[in-house]
């Protein structure tokens, strides 16, 4: 029984921990003191990761489907079988779904397997929509695809803006850093429809009407310009398209925006002043599980650029990833739009470069993400999946019809039942691997226990599979793969397991110029001139949905981020977090709709009374939960009751999957 | 009192390692921080290291412990209880006085009440405890306010005080006496007791200059808590900052909340396990039929501090439930460790 240094693998905070190992099993956990970000803290999930890691609900042996049952086979048999099957399909007929919990080495190899071996560009993660969008906005604006600031300096911040989400639930330890910054004097502002804990801790909580967040941010930018709170001279030098943006700002109808967002003008003016005056300003927004929409991200970027808060020390735009290695997975190119290292897939040069490095011929056709591949009229025929949570299950019927599903995973889940071949793989404490948290910190997690039975690491399974398909991959360890990554992914150029072994992570880019990593984006070191992100001009100054009318007077907001962990097949294997996440479910077994105190009074609603929520296309019955956390005119449904989702929500809205800002016009009726 | 030369520490740990699994403070190579851990190599013991980030609680009240193994046969409906491996004797070396006091508090909870907890007892019977005087407090310490340090008074088998040249050794039990004799330690001479007292006194008076992180004027808070003179707004202010992580309970040397679960193995048997739990959790106090006596988070905070500081609880432990180690302040994402809470209660802080 002793403690081993490691990292938490739940969310994209990447806290340092000490895992207590006894007789080859995880038997406890403790926060690692001295970790640069988590500084000796863990959240409720992190405090119980050993409960997950000790579970016996593992997949131990490879299996091949025979009719309705599975036959246990050896790895070699499973590999031969899979290779034979895969040969039947062209690259376009196969889709690859990676895991944001898998290591960089595993994800890199999974991507290489798709592109180099299977000649398929259909490669994605399921929770990546928001992160990819954020990377695009940031790349366009400043040539840097992830968090521009450094959380190491957060406690000295003067101004912090938190947009959407429920940060104290989603990334609790980063939320804690914000809380400490606030206690040290930072001016904290939350913009979210619901009164979250973060909102309660904030000096100011703004609640623009659902769907108008990007407009509110635009209004703040306009106020900055109108009040002459910007440094026009330095902007002209720093930014390529300042003139165009300036004209755009002038064209915005300021009064109209304030009317539509429902936010007081004087509040925005005072905020704009605070932002300009701040020497150190940060903005946080969720990406991944439930993300901001592109317009809001772009509006936020533009606002910060206008205020002179991009590319300065002590300032930062901070997209926060909800799942442990979501950022790393995108760094490794698990996306139809980016090759490893953020080389855009729509540029010939990106492919040429990769063909030289790998060296292998690659296909150029534009790939799609797995969900899109499944929903097409002519869907793909085979799907290879790593580790999946339940999210993909909404395409159950499509998946059932596929000719081949290959599942690589450590635990049984709904997905494994759909597979034709199942490859058990090691968990993250059963081998070495690196994981990249929201702040670009690449951390090495070293092997702490032996896997059960013969279970092999994913990289080895993929290498053998590639071998059977005529590609001689000679990786002997995850370390080997990292040394290849350091040649392919420029941001990782200066990284190796050897170097990471005695450090608590290194923030990319790590290269010759910055061998110990890079804290934050600095204008003077940037690879390009900055740009305001000016696409979608049509929609960014308009609400995302038409406002509610007579027939559907309520705006229904669907909350996902704070309840994501309920839905999660991983949480279900713990005791305490499961109990805590289920506490609400026990009270409202069929789900609930939150109604403001004012509306409940006006409509004469009682707590737990059943009501019907009716939209244009569907209706659902739910219990009323009277809540001080939402505004009159708004209804809120948390996204966590299984039946409710296909029943009511999925049928009508694909967009709900992605964006924080989504709302639906509905009416509420009492059930007699 | 006896005398242990600096270089005899190896002999002491070597001897202990023959009969006991050795635990003590060691330094993590990468973070440089001190943790209390199993020492496979006795050489990793660092008696000079600061108070470990974790208390020794996990050794006798494990984070996750199998307390029963059984097999249920569906066909015959028979339950067979299976043996659990016998526990190994363990020696805890270099315990800080606060942590030793923590163990004494756990003793009262698990052994000193109506029911004796046999699992705890089994661990406890097989412990060898060596405490170590803090000749200097650490920044987070406030044991002088909670009467639990900086030097141990009872409960140890041996107690060490480092003088610079070597260790003064106090014997606290027969087991301890036997070990001292086996090691053939010299007696420390007539001035030893006075020297130890002087060192402890100096340590106490150095709290003002070294232990600067936390000031906890416990008695005033205890009064208010016991008499119920804490405004609800104070609890609300505290509750809003709680992230409900449970850390304050997990890291506290005296917290003893636990949860029991049955876990089914792949091979057909069930483990009944006991795991750490916390009264900060909503689910912890949830009762059947929707009724949760401590629903809002501020009430659950209130409960914990009542448990640590009120007179009625102190009667149970025969001392305050807080031993002044300052750990809950370091691990709390909400910055509402006990010292801050005590301040808020004393000064009736309800906002910023
Ligand atoms: S904040 Fe995220 S990484 Fe940290 S302990 Fe919690 S779940 Fe783990
Ligand atoms: S609280 Fe007291 S006994 Fe504990 S380490 Fe600090 S000084 Fe020593
Ligand atoms: S309440 Fe806090 S300071 Fe007191 S003993 Fe527990 S952890 Fe240590
Ligand atoms: S450590 Fe702090 S945040 Fe966590 S439960 Fe305790 S008081 Fe709440």
Image (cartoon, grey):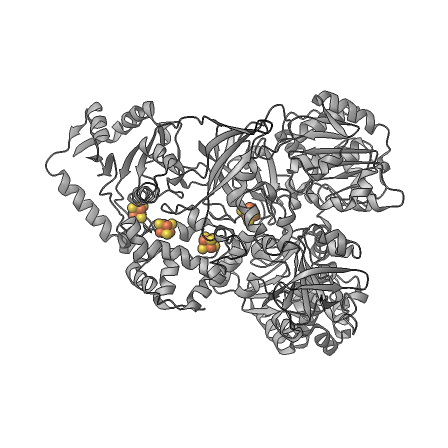
Which x, y percent locates residue A81? Answer: 78, 24
Question: In the picture provided, is A126 more to the left or to the right than A31?
Answer: right
Judged left or right of residue B174, residue A548 is: right
> Percent from the top left, x then y, of residue B30?
47, 38
Extreme residue toward the front, this view: B76
Q: Quadrant of the C terminus of chain B?
A: bottom left
Residue at position x 47%, y 50% in the image: B246
Front-most of residues A297 and A395: A395
Closest to the observer, A168 or A524: A168
Residue at 36%, 63% in the rendered image: B343
- Compared to A177, does A236 lie above or below? below
Q: Is residue A495 visible?
A: no
Asked which quadrant contains residue A138, the reply is bottom right
Q: In this rendered view, identify the residue nearer to me: A165 or B322.
A: B322
Going 28% across and 55% down the picture, which residue do you hit? B145
Can you name the residue that lies furthest to the left here? B190
- Which quadrant of the rendered structure holds the N terminus of chain B? top left
Q: Is residue A280 left or right of residue A231?
A: left
Residue A330, image quadrant: top right
| The residue positioned farthest toward the right in the image shown | A378
Q: Is residue A250 above or below residue A388?
A: below
Answer yes or no: is residue A597 visible. yes
Number of marks in the rendered image: 0
Please, is residue A653 above or below residue A357 in the view? below
Q: Position of residue A300 (x, y in %)?
A: 68, 63
- Give the x, y percent position of residue A364: 85, 40
């Amino acid at each position: 029984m002793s403690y081993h240094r490691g990292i938490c693998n739940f969310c994209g905070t990447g806290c340092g921990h000490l895992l207590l190992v006894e007789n080859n099993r995880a038997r406890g956990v403790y926060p690692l003191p001295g970790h640069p970000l988590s500084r000796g803290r863990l959240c409720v999930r992190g405090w119980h990761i050993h409960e997950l890691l000790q579970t016996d609900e593992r997949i131990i042996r490879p299996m091949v489907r025979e009719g309705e049952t599975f036959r246990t086979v050896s790895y070699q048999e499973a590999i031969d079988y899979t290779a034979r099957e895969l040969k039947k399909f062209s690259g376009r007929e196969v889709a690859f779904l990676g895991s944001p919990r898998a290591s960089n080495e595993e994800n890199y190899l999974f991507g290489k397997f798709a592109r180099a071996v299977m000649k398929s560009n259909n490669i994605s993660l399921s929770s990546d929509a928001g992160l990819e969008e954020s990377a695009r906005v940031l790349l366009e604006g400043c040539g840097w695809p992830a968090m521009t600031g450094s959380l190491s300096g957060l406690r000295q911040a003067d101004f912090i803006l938190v947009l959407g989400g429920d940060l104290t639930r989603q990334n609790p330890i980063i939320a804690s850093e914000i809380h400490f910054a606030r206690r040290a004097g930072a001016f904290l502002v939350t913009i979210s429809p619901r009164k979250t804990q973060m909102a309660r801790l904030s000096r100011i909580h703004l609640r623009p009407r659902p769907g108008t967040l990007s407009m509110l941010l635009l209004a703040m930018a306009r106020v900055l310009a109108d009040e002459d709170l910007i440094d026009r001279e330095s902007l002209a030098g720093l930014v390529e398209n300042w003139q165009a943006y300036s004209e755009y700002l002038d064209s915005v109808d300021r009064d109209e925006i304030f009317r539509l967002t429902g936010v007081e003008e004087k509040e925005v003016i005072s905020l704009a002043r605070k932002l300009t005056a701040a020497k150190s300003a940060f903005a946080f927004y969720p990406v991944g599980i439930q993300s901001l929409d592109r317009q809001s991200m772009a509006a936020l970027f533009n606002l910060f650029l206008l205020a002179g808060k991009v590319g300065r020390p002590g300032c930062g735009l901070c997209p926060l990833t909800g799942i442990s290695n979501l950022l790393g997975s995108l760094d490794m190119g698990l996306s139809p739009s980016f090759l490893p290292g953020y080389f855009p897939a729509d540029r010939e040069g990106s492919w040429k470069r990769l063909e030289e490095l790998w060296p292998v011929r690659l296909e150029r056709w534009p790939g799609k993400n797995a969900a899109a591949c499944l929903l097409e009229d002519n869907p793909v025929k085979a799907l290879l999946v790593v580790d999946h949570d339940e999210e993909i299950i909404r395409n159950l019927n499509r998946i059932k019809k596929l000719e081949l599903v290959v599942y690589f995973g450590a635990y049984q889940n709904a997905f494994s039942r759909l597979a034709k071949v199942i490859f058990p793989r090691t968990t993250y404490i059963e081998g070495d691997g690196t994981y990249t948290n929201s702040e670009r910190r690449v951390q090495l997690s070293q092997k702490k226990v032996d896997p059960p039975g013969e279970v092999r690491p994913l990289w080895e399974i993929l290498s053998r599979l590639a071998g059977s398909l005529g590609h001689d991959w000679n990786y002997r360890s995850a370390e080997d793969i990292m040394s290849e990554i350091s040649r392919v992914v420029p941001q990782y150029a200066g990284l190796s397991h050897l170097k990471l072994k005695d450090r608590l992570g290194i923030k990319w880019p790590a290269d010759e110029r910055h061998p110990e990593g890079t804290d934050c984006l600095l204008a003077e070191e940037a690879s390009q001139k900055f740009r305001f992100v000016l696409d979608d001009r049509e929609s960014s100054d308009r609400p995302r949905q038409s406002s509610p009318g007579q027939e559907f007077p309520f705006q229904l907001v669907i909350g996902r981020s704070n309840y994501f962990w309920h839905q999660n097949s991983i949480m279900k294997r713990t005791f305490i977090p499961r109990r805590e996440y289920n506490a609400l479910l026990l009270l409202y077994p069929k789900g609930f709709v939150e109604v403001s105190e004012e509306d409940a009074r006006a409509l004469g609603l009682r707590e737990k009374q059943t009501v019907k929520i009716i939209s244009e296309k569907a209706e659902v019955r739910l219990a009323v939960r009277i809540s001080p956390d939402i505004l009159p005119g708004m209804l809120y449904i948390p996204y966590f009751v299984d039946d409710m989702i296909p029943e009511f929500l999925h049928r009508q809205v694909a967009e709900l999957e992605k964006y924080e800002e989504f709302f639906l016009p509905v009416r509420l009726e009492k059930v007699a | 009192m006896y005398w242990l030369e600096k270089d005899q520490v190896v002999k002491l740990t070597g001897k202990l390692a023959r009969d006991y699994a050795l635990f003590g403070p060691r330094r993590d190579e990468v973070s440089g921080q001190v943790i209390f851990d199993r020492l496979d190599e006795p050489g990793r013991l660092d008696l000079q290291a600061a108070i470990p980030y974790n208390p020794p609680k996990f050794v006798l009240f494990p984070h996750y412990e199998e307390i029963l193994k059984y097999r249920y046969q569906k066909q015959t409906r028979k339950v067979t209880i299976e043996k659990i491996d016998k526990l190994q004797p363990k020696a805890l070396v270099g315990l800080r006085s606060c942590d030793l006091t923590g163990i004494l508090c756990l003793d009262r909870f698990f052994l000193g009440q109506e029911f004796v907890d046999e699992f705890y007892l089994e661990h406890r019977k097989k412990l060898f405890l060596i405490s170590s005087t803090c000749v200097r407090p650490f920044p987070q310490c406030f044991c002088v306010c909670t009467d639990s340090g900086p030097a141990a008074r009872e409960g140890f088998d041996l107690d060490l005080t480092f003088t610079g040249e070597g260790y003064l050794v106090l014997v606290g039990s027969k087991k301890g006496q036997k070990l001292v004799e086996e090691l053939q330690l010299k007696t420390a001479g007539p001035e030893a007791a006075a020297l130890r007292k002087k060192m402890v006194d100096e340590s106490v008076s150095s709290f003002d200059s070294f232990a600067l992180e936390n000031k906890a004027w416990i008695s005033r808070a205890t009064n208010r808590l016991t008499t119920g003179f804490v405004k609800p707004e104070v609890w609300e202010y505290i509750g809003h900052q709680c992230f409900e992580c449970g850390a304050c309970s997990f890291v506290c040397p005296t917290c003893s909340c636990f949860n029991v679960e049955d876990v089914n193995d792949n091979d057909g048997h069930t483990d009944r396990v006991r795991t750490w739990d916390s009264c900060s959790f909503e689910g912890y106090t949830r009762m059947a039929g929707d009724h949760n006596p401590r629903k809002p988070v501020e009430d659950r905070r209130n409960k914990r501090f009542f448990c640590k500081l009120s007179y009625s609880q102190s009667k149970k432990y025969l001392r305050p439930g807080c031993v002044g180690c300052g750990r809950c302040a370091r691990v709390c994402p909400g910055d509402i460790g006990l010292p801050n809470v005590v301040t808020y209660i004393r000064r009736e802080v309800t906002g910023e």
